[in-house]
Amino acid sequence: MAGTRKKTTDDPLAPVTLAVGQEELLLERAVREVVAAARESDADTDVRELAAADLQPGTLAELTSPSLFAERKVVAVHNSHDLSAESVKDVKAYLGAPAEEITLVLLHAGGAKGKGLLDAARKAGAREVACAKLTKPADRLAFVRGEFRGLGRSATPEAAQALVDAVGSDLRELSSACNQLVADIEGTIDEAVVARYYTGRAEASGFTVADRAVEGRAAEALETLRWAMATGVAPVLITSALAQGVRGIGKLASAPRGMRPGDLARELGMPPWKIDRIRQQMRGWSADGVSTALRAVAAADDAVKGAGDDPEYALEQAVIAVARAARSR
């Protein structure tokens, strides 16, 4: 009957996957899950990831046209709520007759903007993945438990709660912490292990190091970094915080001018207080500075995960690079 909603599926290789929400980590995982399933089916799968601005009228038809070699393809469109009206028409038409061996992934913030596309994808029976921000403590606790289960390890309820209390609400940090504990600890992870790793975190967290660095306060950032390392903060949590700090500056710098604070907060997926803090921190930054800092943090992240011989030195160099970039304007 006209207007009915098609039945959805949990198959990652469904013709269309709709990832809805503003949690970057979950959005990235939604894409990775589809890509992994596609490459398991066909190792030569072609993966195309596009920003909304890259999907011009006619682009989708070109990307989804039959291939001479009939290869599998994944096309992921980030921020699909920002698509132009013409491109939305193309996507809606495609939803009615998706191509074989092609999986389209639409990443959508889930708000009122672009709601027509969201409704059309749901009506067409798109597989939907929830990627909303986890704002409730119970949801973050469930996330941590799920991380440990996914890594094939067990953690006591007290340990999971202690980790959430110590690390905070950022899912990237929580995920990194789970991975770090699993890599370092054998057997069940308990509250004592978490306490040993995160003693002193409130005074010298990765976020404190990042705040000092993005503000250009190199000496203070280095002092805080050394205290954090001495009190057991995992290096991967520090690189994660640095990356988040620099990405936040890049996001705010590229945001449309003149938006109301509430609209800007929803657009960037940040609370208003955080936007106010980043606005103060970004005064000395340039676009080149953001790029340079992200490269330095990425190099340090590789080093602390095994690619380098001296993780502490790599972190110091990253902090110095970020602090210099904070004065690049």
Image (cartoon, helix red, strand yellow):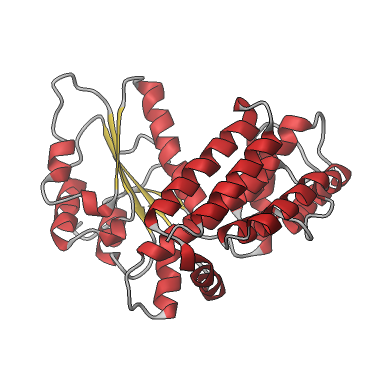
Q: Is residue 222 above or below residue 314?
A: below
Question: Which residue is depicted at the point 18% across and 36% down?
Answer: 64
Split into 4 quadrants, where in the image is the N terminus?
Answer: bottom left
Residue 83 image point, x, y percent? 23, 58
Among all residues in the image, which is located at the extreme left? 58
Question: Which residue is depicted at the point 67% across and 37% down?
Answer: 313
Apparent side of residue 187 relative to residue 167 in the rendered image (left or right): right
Residue 144 image point, x, y percent? 67, 48
Q: Is residue 313 above or below residue 24?
A: above
Split into 4 quadrants, where in the image is the C terminus?
Answer: bottom left
Residue 79 image point, x, y percent? 33, 56
Apparent side of residue 119 relative to residue 313 in the rendered image (left or right): left
Apparent side of residue 185 relative to residue 8 in the rendered image (left or right): right
Dividing the picture into quadrants, the one containing residue 139 is bottom right
Residue 289 image point, x, y percent? 44, 53
Residue sitting nearer the eye, 157 or 262:
262
Dividing the picture into quadrants, the one containing residue 147 is top right
Question: Which residue is depicted at the point 29% across and 66% down?
Answer: 115
Question: Which residue is depicted at the point 77% across and 45% down?
Answer: 229
